[in-house]
């Protein structure tokens, strides 16, 4: 992996120049953002994967729904098998499969029961979404770089662990590093959310503080609240899985956080299969899971919610295996001040 990064290093300045020119064109209004007939809250990052955008979107959707707001979620639908605009749910019924719309938006709909749609072109997608559902607030998933649509609130999320990564490549721009944009792009954010996940809170590293100065900064964490049977949707307490020998299956950007959560819940994580992010499961992977499950004499398969929505498509092939996902919830450390900030900006 490091060897490949060395090979790609000469392309970093090229990518950086392209991003810089694009942002300047938007800043100078040569490229223009377009308003839509709804309030828009963008959730995004400037790094590749694993920051916790989907849990944050779910948190916002549930919060705004609880306040009586007619809220919906619009995503690009990364990894889906379809193209163009697609209405995923009207808030009551789901109209697509996970493969048609993408794992993240499908997970969001299952968790929130709010209207949702996918579209690569966010402005046209938002207009159609508003027409179809009458939503008054749209949460844009992964839209910090999608500057064609105006937003009332731009939330930028960082994984705390990423900020402390010691290797120089991690904080380098693509394609050698993990940065979509440089740190000084934080100036566009209305608020920065540092997601510590299951780790203790830590101060921002000194060399990064200049990018976070004079910003509304909030911190968030994950709470593991139980396990859910993927097929039967039955909920089980954390205590019931303590010391259980399970086969851990993961296909997310940052499995470290998931494994750390399982260890904290005392689940045995010695046996594991780690796939790449947004893994598209086929019968081949399902058979691999089955083979490893029986070879390790595991009691159950434990996975993430994002993986579970895709594995549920193979309920017949996995009908002799108990498979559960760890249900987590994002919580704000300073929830009241964040709620006040959010509602003031969109009311």
Image (cartoon, rainbow, N blue to C red):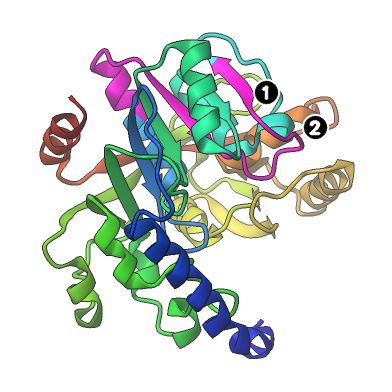
Residue ID for mark 2:
318
Please say if the residues under marks 1 and 2 sit with CB atoms less than 8 Å apart: yes
- Badge 1 crowding class, 10 Å Cα cut-off, few under 14, some 14 to 19, many 20 or more, is some
Residue 243 lies, with reference to residue 173, above or below; the image says above
Question: Which label belongs to residue 319?
Answer: none
Please check the rendered image and state whether residue 79 is part of the magenta-colored stretch, yes or no. yes
Marks 1 and 2, the one that precedes in the sequence: 1
Name the spot of residue 171 as percent of width and height, x first. 43, 78
Residue visible at 22% across and 50% down in the picture: 190
Residue 314, how many percent across, how many down? 80, 31
At numbered mark 2, what does the secondary structure look like: helix, strand or loop? loop
> Residue at image x 61%, y 89%?
10
Q: Nearer the viewer, residue 204 or 42?
A: 42
- Other residues around mark 2 within 10 Å, as few (<14) / some (14–19) / many (≥20): some
Left/right of residue 38 with respect to residue 176 in the rendered view: left
Query: Can residue 289 be seen in this snapshot?
Result: yes
Q: Position of residue 243 (x, y in %)?
A: 52, 48
Q: In the drawing, what numbered circle is on residue 231?
A: 1
Q: Tell me how many marks there are.
A: 2
* Residue placed furthest toward the top: 92
Image check: 4 left or right of 133? right
């Amino acid at each position: 992996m490091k060897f490949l990064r060395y090979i790609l290093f000469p392309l970093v300045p090229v990518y950086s120049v392209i991003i810089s020119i694009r942002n300047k064109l938007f800043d100078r209004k040569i490229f223009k953002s377009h308003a839509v007939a709804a309030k828009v809250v963008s959730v995004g990052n400037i790094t590749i994967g694993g920051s916790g955008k989907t849990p944050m979107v779910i948190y916002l959707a549930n919060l705004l729904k609880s306040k009586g707001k007619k809220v919906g979620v619009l995503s690009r639908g990364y990894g889906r098998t379809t193209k163009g605009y697609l209405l995923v749910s009207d808030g009551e019924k789901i109209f697509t499969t996970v493969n048609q719309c993408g794992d993240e938006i499908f997970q969001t709909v299952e968790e929130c029961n709010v209207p949702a749609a996918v579209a690569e072109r966010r402005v046209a997608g938002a207009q159609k979404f508003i027409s179809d559902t009458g939503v008054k607030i749209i949460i844009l998933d992964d839209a910090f770089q999608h500057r064609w649509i105006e937003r009332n609130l731009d939330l930028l999320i960082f994984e705390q662990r990423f900020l402390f990564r010691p290797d120089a490549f991690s904080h380098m721009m693509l394609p050698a590093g993990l940065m979509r944009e440089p740190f000084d792009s934080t100036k566009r954010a209305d608020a920065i959310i540092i997601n510590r996940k299951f780790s203790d809170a830590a101060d921002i590293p000194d060399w990064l503080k200049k990018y976070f100065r004079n910003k509304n900064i909030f911190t968030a964490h994950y709470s593991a609240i139980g396990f859910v049977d993927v097929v039967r949707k039955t909920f089980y307490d954390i205590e019931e899985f303590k010391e259980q020998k399970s086969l851990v299956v993961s296909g997310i950007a940052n499995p470290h956080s998931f494994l750390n959560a399982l260890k904290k819940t005392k689940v045995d994580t010695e046996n594991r299969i780690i796939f790449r992010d947004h893994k598209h499961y086929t019968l081949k992977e399902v058979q691999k899971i089955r083979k490893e499950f029986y070879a390790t004499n595991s009691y159950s398969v434990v996975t993430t919610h994002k993986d579970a929505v895709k594995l549920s498509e193979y309920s017949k092939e996995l009908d002799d295996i108990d498979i559960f996902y760890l249900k987590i919830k994002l919580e704000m450390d300073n929830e009241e001040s964040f709620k006040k900030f959010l509602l003031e900006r969109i009311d």
